[in-house]
Amino acid sequence: MRAPVGGGGFPGAGQPVEASADSDRRLAEALIAGRQEAFEPFVGRFAPLILNFGRRLCGHRDDADEVLQETLLRTYQSVRDLREPAALKSWVYRVAANACLRLRRRGKHEPKRNISLDEVLPSRRGERRPPEIADWSDVPLERLLQGELKQRLEEAILALPKAYRIVLVLRDQEGFDTRETARILGISETLAKVRLHRARLAVRKALDGYLGRAPGLRGRATRRTATARAPHPPGRMTCRQMVEALSDHIDGGLDEALRRTIQEHGGDCPPCRAFVRTLERTVEAVRAQPRQPLPPALSARLAQAMRAACS
């Protein structure tokens, strides 16, 4: 397959191009057929997406640029291996995820670590009631996406072990569902759900450690501290059981009976109610992080590299 000859960057490659599965299918079919006019739409569609994915996952601009170039080259050169043209987006992200993991192995080894549920909860197993929990859910979302709070949020995500971070990024920032995320990473849906939930809890805990102490944020929301009441009676949902089901609750994946049980538990347990609210605010902030446009200079370098490699 030959790329079209030309100079400069790619038209329309600054911001992500909105597309449906049907338009992705048509684009994939054009690429598979070797139609040169599909080259620029392909880059315009995926270059901004993969650049942001690489930066969110790798944490370093140079690494993200390398992941972007490798992903587009590998995908473009091997697109005829794609069996389901409508799944082009998932396939591109699978290539990008593997490229980022290979990049890690070539550099410094990030220690492999699992996140246990106990380390991201406000109370430990065996405690009869949760401690006091600050409810900072009223901190405006736009404030969480600016200045020092924005930096704290980004640092909290980058501090996650990569196996957890990649699931969080794919689900909450790139918009894939659990099934698609599991397919991209080659893991089970159950494992994807577990890693997503614990990643969200870890980011919430990192924000809580800052928002509960920051002098400039000690307004009404951060002073509203929920104190535990008496222990729940036997047979009722425990605080730990409630927390374990929270991600499915937030994502709308629970049946009506269990959803109602969680709501009833929160009504009886102010600390858990505060925990739910702050976790929901955390997920909102993670999802709302803005994308960065593809710099024109990078677009030009990418165009030159791909034309040289594909000609």
Image: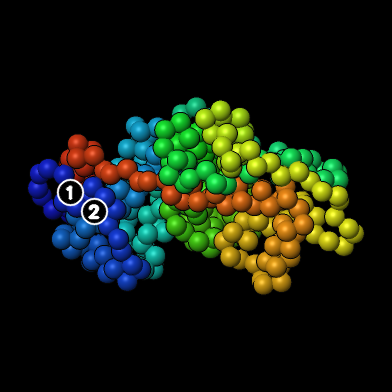
Instruction: Give the residue at the far left of this rendering.
Output: 6
**Mark 2 vs mark 1: which is more N-terminal?**
1
Task: Look at 15% across and 61% down and name the residue there.
Answer: 37
Residue 59: image quadrant is top left
Residue 199 visible in the current orientation: no
Residue 181 visible in the current orientation: yes
In the depicted view, which residue is nearer to us: 6 or 117?
Answer: 117
Give the SS element for disc 1.
Answer: loop
Task: Look at 58% across and 41% down and name the residue there.
Answer: 220
User: CB of mark 2 within 8 Å of CB of mark 1?
Assistant: yes
Up/down of 88 relative to 185, above or below: below
**In the rendering, which numbered label is found on residue 44?**
2
Find residue 180 and report its horizontal and vertical position in percent.
49, 61
Find residue 281 and report its horizontal and vertical position in percent.
55, 49
Which residue bears the numbered disc 1? 10
Task: Look at 24% across and 39% down and name the residue there.
Answer: 295
Task: Look at 63% across and 61% down and name the residue there.
Answer: 249
Q: How many marks?
A: 2
Give the SS element for disc 2.
Answer: helix
